Amino acid sequence: MTTTHVLGYPRIGKQRQLKFALEAYWRGELSQAELFALGKQLREENWQLQQKAGQAWVTVGDFAWYDQVLTTSMMLGNLPRRHQSAELSLDSMFAIARGQQGSGCCNAASDMSKWFNTNYHYIVPEFSEQTQFSLQWRQLLEEVDEALALGHKVKPVILGPVSYLYLGKNELGAAKDFDRLSLLKQLLPVYAEIYQALAERGIEWVQVDEPILGLEIDIAWKGALLEAYKQPLSDCKILLTSYFSDVLDNTSVIKALAVDGLHLDLSAAPEQLDAVLSWLPEHWVLSAGVINGRNVWRANLPALIEAYCALKAQLGERLWLASSCSLLHCPLDLAAESNLGDAEYRLAFAEQKLTELQLLAEAINGDKQALRVARQYSAALSRVARPLTQEEQAQAASIPRQRSLSFAERQAIQQQQLALPLLPTTTIGSFPQTQEIRRQRREYKAGLLSEADYKAALAEHIKQAIECQERLGLDVLVHGEAERNDMVEYFAEQLDGFIVSRFGWVQSYGSRCVKPAIIVDDISRNQALTLEWAEYAQSLSTKPVKGMLTGPVTILSWSFPREDISRQQIAEQIALALRDEVNDLQQAGIQIIQIDEPAIREGMPLKRSQWQAYLDWAVAAFKLAASSAEPSTQIHTHMCYSEFNEILPAVAALDADVLTIETSRSAMSLLQAFEEFEYPNQIGPGVYDIHSPNIPSVDEIKALITKAAQLIPLARLWVNPDCGLKTRDWQQTEAALTNMVLASQQLRTSL
Ligand code: GLN
Ligand code: ZN
């Protein structure tokens, strides 16, 4: 029999039970015992599914109350110093993740960071020269015992010591010259202790994740890997796992490690297989990650069967079949859906992926019935994309991406039309998404509120947002995005080529989940997307109201993409649709159009060597979307992050008339880079942090604007918050914007 396994399974539950239980617990409405019981139940279900699908083991250690990296920190006894006074407990874990307030103390949460190039966020471990490790939080061992007691064969998963250090950062107050790699020596004995405890439980294999094997790492980190795996630390066998990328940059290191097997992500990087086979040590197992854990498409089983039958003949029992990465990154169960049309026959969520692995293994083992089922199962995939006709190709290629006039020329025309004051004030788009709006949308989607009533309600919310902005004296208004629940789903619902699932949730962080839209076909726009509300909002004010679009790269990044055409091609299709929307908006008299691209940076490939190619097509897609704008139409874009260093040339190449960015938390120091780069167009550096409920004072905002004005000429400076206001309430919003407008107005006369 061929060994099959998954690197991890989603823990949130088919109905997002863990999410709701966590939130109830945090509100004090659920007891710890009830929460624990639910976790136990979810783990049991997941293990049972894996067992039923004939997996060699159930994977244990993928369950986390908040985040698996945070669980690892707890296990290693590594808490940020400011949290160390508390006993290790579920609550102290949540305090690290969410911050702790009250009883005279306020301990800030640890940072959150994106897990490689996924949309999952982990809690960043913190290190200093005082960090000490010891085996503390015994969740992993307890869950192993729990699974063993249920009669399962168990393969624990653990984040490897080198990636654990790599993914962390220096704690505030750590010595300047502190190098967290120096901690490896004292970290390894704790890992040895954990492996030993597992060995004592009869565990044969441990899956040790070292995802940094897929990165371009420097010599010091390579040395750390050699150090960490130079000898076995216990009797357990180690399956070294990498994912999301190929390991070829680290071949010479990997070959030298004292491990017993290697897992490759052959879905993200199939081309690495031959190279690895050429040097794979004879006694190692190869875990072939062929079932894509990051997307929702059925596997092409016949093709896999053919390819891996040959490899099976070569490797025999040393060939394992696996998910490419943890299934954490895909939704749980397709069977819960009912309205996906014939796309259903092309999709597979986590539970279906288990079946795929089973079929694949059976067919490779020569089971004729499995082969027949596999062929049938993947049959609907053979529908290939309709290639663009020559005419369409020529048409797409003939669209000039460059705007017809230079920025300076456009600026003059726009200024004449818009007649904005110095330091114009605006916001990023969304206004508070109140309980009321959410309830109305829920009722509308459930058929409890008629379309007419829902629209009337939205119109009322938009009207209130416009009136509020008028009252506050903002210069450029927004309609407030009441009709959107997130930045992509609204567009996916209107565009052809997308489907939106009902329960396709994927954990983003903690209790938060996202439901990415699924791109199933060529994308086209058969109706205006945003025009109606934009026109309505503009009709309520004589001030300019921004049209508000999500950019092509962001729509793509936050969806599940097709795999039969390239990401670049998909982005281009979305861009063409947005291009028509831009034109409709300007024809209707919308003078300013914002095309948000908060995801450009996170879409960057893991390897630096691939960045430029990505940025080239990402920029081209944005420009295509904006390419229908007349010189008099002012194009804004928004990006809410603060690391621009490497991508400034690309950001400048977007040639947006106005760029709004997140800067308040870095106290404008980010603008230095823009100044040095001589960023040519207008900029709206965020003057307050919308993530915090704090109300910034007029003076604080003035100080920030003054600082910004030292770096960017006044004539090119805008005043706005860091990001959209949808997570704030109305009171906070009004108070903060009042001060923002006052600050700008006072400076207009004094600067
Ligand atoms: N226009 C969006 C909003 O204001 C932008 C959100 C974002 O950048 N993530 O909500
Ligand atoms: Zn933002």
Image (tube, helix red, strand yellow):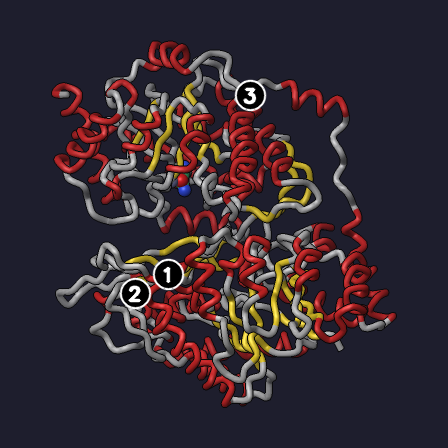
Q: Position of residue 32 (x, y in %)?
A: 35, 78
Label 3 CB, ligand 1: below 8 Å? no
Residue position marked by numbered label 2 in the rendering:
96
Q: Earlier in the sequence, mark 1 or mark 3?
A: 1
Residue found 42% across the figure and 77% down from its top: 191
Crowding near the residue tagged with mark 2, few <14, some 14–19, many ≥20 C-alpha atoms within 10 Å: many
The amino acid on which the numbered mark 2 sits, given as a three-letter code, is Ile
Query: How many badges with numbers are in the image?
Result: 3
Q: Is residue 700 visible?
A: yes
Residue in the picture at 70% in, 73% down:
318
Q: Amino acid at mark 3?
A: Arg
Q: Quadrant of residue 697?
A: top left
Task: Evaluate whether residue 336 shows in this view.
Answer: no
Identify the residue shown where x is 25% and y is 36%.
668
**Alpha carbon of mark 2 to alpha carbon of mark 1: how far?**
8 Å
Depth check: 504 or 666 in front?
666
Left or right of residue 430, residue 687 in this image: left
